[in-house]
Amino acid sequence: MKVSIVAGIGTKRSIRHHARLAGPVGLGVVLGLIGPFGTYELLPTLPRLGYWLAVVALNWLLCDIAIRRIEALVPATLPLRRVAVPLACALLVSLPAVVATANGLSGVGWPENLAVLFVQIALLLAAISLPVYTLADLREAVEASATPREAAQGDNPPTGLALFQARLSGPLEGRLLCLEMQDHYLAVHTTAGSDLVLCRMEDAARELGTLGQRVHRSWWVAADAVDGVECGGQRLILRLTDDRRVPVGRTYRDGLRREGFLNT
């Protein structure tokens, strides 16, 4: 059973990452063909394609890391969030190091004006991050809301665990232990194994209500899954019934103590 669940998670992750790579790879090919910023005249077709694919790939990786951090810090209610997050990311990671190195190695030449190069990189990163982030966010919102909305249309709309289970592709197997945030997905850990669901942690925690508590930015834990609390210096760790260790975030500790969640 666990083998099939793990295989399913691997397949979903592979599909997800391939889909997210399609945009940057496509942009790299387009830029390689049209040759902006003087690269059309300076490089033959194949080296130019390799140059732009490498530059876009490396900068996309930096963008992806920055977007995850910024997205976790920015409230979901921020106006124009789909535009503000990727643009802030583009400005933060617009360091000329990647492009300057690529220019030097490819024969384009080392940059003479770093300010101009910074602006060019910022435009490139905005072109990468805006469509990739917007499409991923829209897909998440549509897919994550579809199943609960259909379930709520019945005469007896589900609540609590039943409402959260409506997001899953099938019945929840085993007893729910915890949820772990992974990009736009949640890993649902039960006594029977693990699975992935496209869902925001905030939505899942709200739907599950008093069945558990969010203990970390990336973790939610079921109340009956806590087997003990471990302290190590400044760190606070929850030991679950399956011997899993889950960190407790500093910002969550006072609220968890008030709820009696750390008195196990």
Image (spheres, helix red, strand yellow):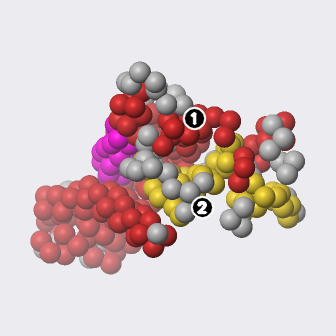
Residues in magenta, as a range: 123-143
Residue 22 at x, y percent in the picture: 25, 59
Q: Quadrant of residue 109?
A: bottom left
Using the numbered discs, state the Cα–Cα distance from disc 2 to disc 1 in whole angstroms: 19 Å
- Seen in the picture, residue 146 relative to 173 is either above or below; the reply is above
- Seen in the picture, residue 102 relative to 115 is either above or below; the reply is below
Residue 259 at x, y percent in the picture: 81, 37
Q: Residue at x 50, y 35 (%)?
A: 163
Choose between 118 and 19: the one closer to the eye: 19
Q: Residue at x 37, y 24 (%)?
A: 153
Name the amino acid type tagged 2. Answer: Thr
Choose between 44 and 62: the one closer to the eye: 62
Q: Residue at x 48, y 43 (%)?
A: 165
The answer to whether residue 35 of the structure is visible from this angle is: no
**In the visual, does 17 lie left or right of 214?**
left
Identify residue for label 1: 160
Identify residue for label 2: 191
